[in-house]
Image: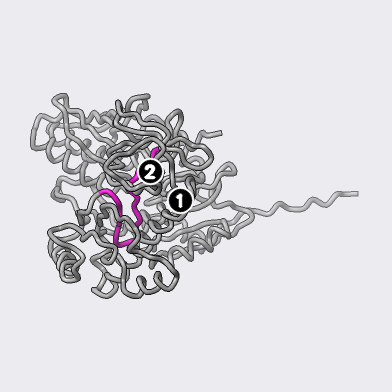
Amino acid sequence: MSRKIEAKASVVISEEEQRSLNTAAGKLLFTSIQGRQCAMVIEKDRLVEAAFLNPGKVGAVYIGKIKNMAKNIDACFVEIPKGEICFLPLKNAESPFLVNRIYDGRILEGDELLVQVARDAQKSKRASVTAHISLANEYFVLSLGSAKIGYSTKLSPKVKDAIRKEFTEKALAQNGFLIQNIGTLLSIPEADRMKAQGIKPESIPLPSVGLVVRTKAEELGAEELWNQFYSISGQFVRLLYTAMHRSCFSCLRKAPAEFEAMVQQFAGEDAELKVSLSDEELPPYSEPSPCRREIVTDHEALYEQLQEYCSAHRYSLPVRLYRDSMLSLSTLYSLESRLESALSRRVWLKCGGSLIIENTEALTVIDVNSGKCEVGADAGKAYQKINLEAAEEVARQLRLRNLSGIIIVDFINMQSAGDNRKLLQYMRELTARDRVPTKVVDITALGLVEITRQKINKPLSEQYHLT
């Protein structure tokens, strides 16, 4: 008697899914790899950013207690909930909000103050906090520490002048500084609501509060501008008032969901990068296909959160829920193999050159090699071409690998001082897109480019190999 063998179901990618695999415009994927939730950005079939989403505390606001001072290093140590001791540089506590006494210019052991987590604990290093609490929306950032009004460098002088005039006419600013009065931070309806709730804003000992106007503020009309300003300033005043009536070690504001930073960065990348080099000097660039940028996830609960978040922040990005029991989202986009190659020591360039990336305890070293690139008769022009392409790849690798601290890049030596200046300027313009503060310091006498990148989260290699 013959036994009937059932045919195995074959995995077939639908025509619609084939179209969705086009990553020219860019896709932000939220899925799981090896049982851990992660976020990946793919553009032009290349992985450009990756992060494993582990719950952290960055952005959370607590009432902490100073355990001891360390004046020899201009810092102190602050205890937050669950007995965690955090590092607080005194330069980040120049205008603290104390809740157990009136601030007299000094910070003492035993003081209870408002702190915000700036960096999670990493390896042997403690978490870092700041007393310069900041709250932000898409248009403004309000923070303790300085009363100055700052503007995004991407805003045009005309827009800056128009917003500056609005704040002056509203009697909210004077000589480039925010007027330090609780009344300036509250709209009349919000002040009335607070009074009806028994809240007395005038009782708040207001420290120095400053403002930063973000790039997206240029999209707003006058009425919406004030709606957005009073929205964030009202939250700020309520936070300070709440701190006055809560016990030590209370959490006043939870850390934002980790997916939010990825979505914000992805949504803001439609803007075209402006560079100062001519078309002849730039590496070849291919126009992306007209397909739309989108967010894709295979987690149903996260799908709903993403939809709500994009709707609340007016992002026009479509959010798609991927469902296929035969083919996982990570397999569809070969995410594990992309991760492995993204963390390899050597990175090849289109021109035939390569980067060698070495991580040490103190810094990261990136060496640019001409490799298989044909130099030809005009060596200077060839080296410039390799270096410009390498600069693009270095900026991409900093973001992809989440490299931080001191980074030294050994570009191919160029004899022309003008070529070196162009390379340095181009490197600065490329890194300006990074959501993590990155500074291209200078080029040394030996031709080494010095870069520093703020350390916020663990490098990708540590995240990926975390057991």
Please name the residue shown 16% across and 24% down the image: 446
Q: Position of residue 20 (x, y in %)?
A: 47, 60
Q: Amino acid at mark 1?
A: Ala
Q: Residue at x 45, y 44 (%)?
A: 51
On the image, which quarter does residue 125 sit in?
top left
Write the start and end of the magenta stretch as one range.
127-145
Q: Residue at x 13, y 41 (%)?
A: 422
Spatial separation of the CA atoms under disc 2 and disc 1: 10 Å
Judged left or right of residue 4, residue 43 is: left
Q: Residue furthest right?
A: 1
Q: Is residue 292 visible?
A: yes
Q: Position of residue 328 (x, y in %)?
A: 58, 51
404 displayed left or right of 34: left
Quadrant of image for the C terminus? top right
| Total labels drawn | 2
Helix, strand or loop at label 2? It is strand
Q: Nearer the viewer, residue 157 or 232?
A: 232
The residue lying toward the viewer, choosing from 146 and 322, is 146
Q: Is residue 331 visible?
A: no
Q: Position of residue 233 (x, y in %)?
A: 33, 63
Q: For the point 33% across and 25% down, which residue is it?
A: 362
> Which element is circle 1 on?
loop
Q: Which residue is mark 2?
A: 118
In front of the other: 65 or 74: 65
Which disc number belongs to residue 438?
none
Which residue is denoted by mark 1 in the rendering? 255
Answer whether residue 136 is magenta in the image.
yes
Earlier in the chain: of badge 2 and badge 1, it is 2
Residue type pointed to by label 2 = Ala
